[in-house]
Amino acid sequence: MNGSSNVLVLGVTGQVGKRVATNLKRKKATLSVGSRRKANLKELADQFGASRFIDLDDPRTFDEALNNVTSIFLITGYTVDMLVQSKSLIDAAKRNGVTHIVHLGAFTREHDSYATVFAWHQMIEAYLRDSGIAWTNLHPNMFMQNFLSVWSIKGGLYSAYTSKAIGFTALEDVAEAAAVILMEGPEKHSGMDYWFSVEALTPHQVAETLTAVTGRKFTAAVHHAEGFQNDAAQPGSAFEPAYAKGGLELFRQVEDGRMAYVGSVKDDTKKILGREPLLLSEWAKLHASELLEIAGG
């Protein structure tokens, strides 16, 4: 392990954390990646330069993992445990002199986000703001990468759980922005909330865009919000029941208008990266072969 590492990236076995760490490495940042799987540490160190053992369910691992760390990319799993994990990690970060935490949250609006998962993120953000550590909160709307999930698109049919428009953002943009924020540090980004929702599209507009880009016919089917819980409960799903309930609440409240703001455009990508964000048509070009494979040719 590299004791001089000062950026600790969590969640590198998932898509977001891996892309954040990859961007930091490309930008020559000094970083470590965290993992609860000791068997993975050598491979991760070979890939990113340094790794640290940290188990978010065991705060006894935090002090050693945070030795010489000055900033953290905080991302949690898809369970209600995200609350205690984040609180205990923030406490340990303060105790160990961490000066900046960049937290990946959700596309929330103050006092108007009552879906379970959205409320959880707001609670974490409130605790982080009161911690005394410099903070930056990232608020991505629906990731375009969700289209690469088999349960999302199968046989060219896009399954949606609301008929209303939803805002989308590319994971590539959010991950690169997180890396830039971590490198530029709290001097520039402390106390900032950044939003990532570049394009608001209905299910049928999504299907039309994917069709135009790939040349393969995509169609959209709008299911009741309850359908998300059913799909999220399938074997191999990353969602626990309480988290899946948050998805049900989200789509139900978007449909009835209580969370209509999820279908809005509000994006800080250009402010952070100095370039325009990826639209769905541009993102789909980058992932056309994957979309065709998911769709079945």
Image (spheres, rainbow, N blue to C red):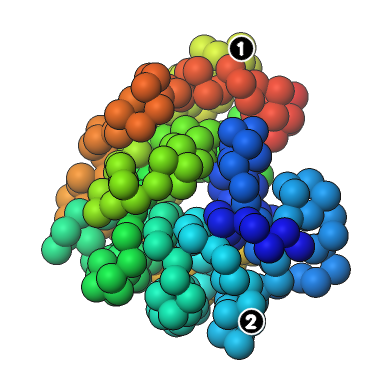
Residue shown at 34% from the left, 50% from the top: 186
Give residue 150's quadrant in the image: top right
Q: Nearer the viewer, residue 105 or 270?
A: 270
Report the quarter where the C terminus lies. top right
Residue 37 point in image, percent of width and height = 76, 70
The amino acid marked with disc number 2 is Thr
Residue shown at 30% from the left, 74% from the top: 131
Assess disc 1: are there few (<14), some (14-19) or many (≥20) residues with their C-alpha within 10 Å of its C-alpha.
Answer: few
Look at mark 2 in the image and give the residue it sits on: 61
Q: Secondary structure at mark 1?
A: loop
Residue 220 point in image, percent of width and height = 47, 33
Look at mark 1 in the image and give the residue it sits on: 215
Seen from this angle, which residue lies furthest left?
111
Residue shown at 63% from the left, 36% from the top: 28
Q: Is residue 149 left or right of residue 84?
A: right
Residue shown at 63% from the left, 82% from the top: 61
Residue 159 point in image, percent of width and height = 50, 42
Q: Is residue 12 above or below residue 79?
A: above
Res. 199 in view = no
Q: Is residue 229 above or below residue 93?
A: above
Assess disc 2: are there few (<14), some (14-19) or many (≥20) residues with their C-alpha within 10 Å of its C-alpha.
Answer: some
Q: How many marks?
A: 2
Res. 101 in view = yes
Work out how far the residue at label 2 is from the one at label 1, CA to CA, in angstroms: 50 Å
Q: Earlier in the sequence, mark 2 or mark 1?
A: 2
Judge depth for marks 2 and 1 and give the one in front: 2
Residue 206 point in image, percent of width and height = 44, 28
Q: Is residue 169 left or right of residue 12?
A: left
The amino acid marked with disc number 1 is Gly
Residue 179's mark? Answer: none
Q: Is residue 129 left or right of residue 205?
A: left
Q: Secondary structure at mark 2?
A: helix
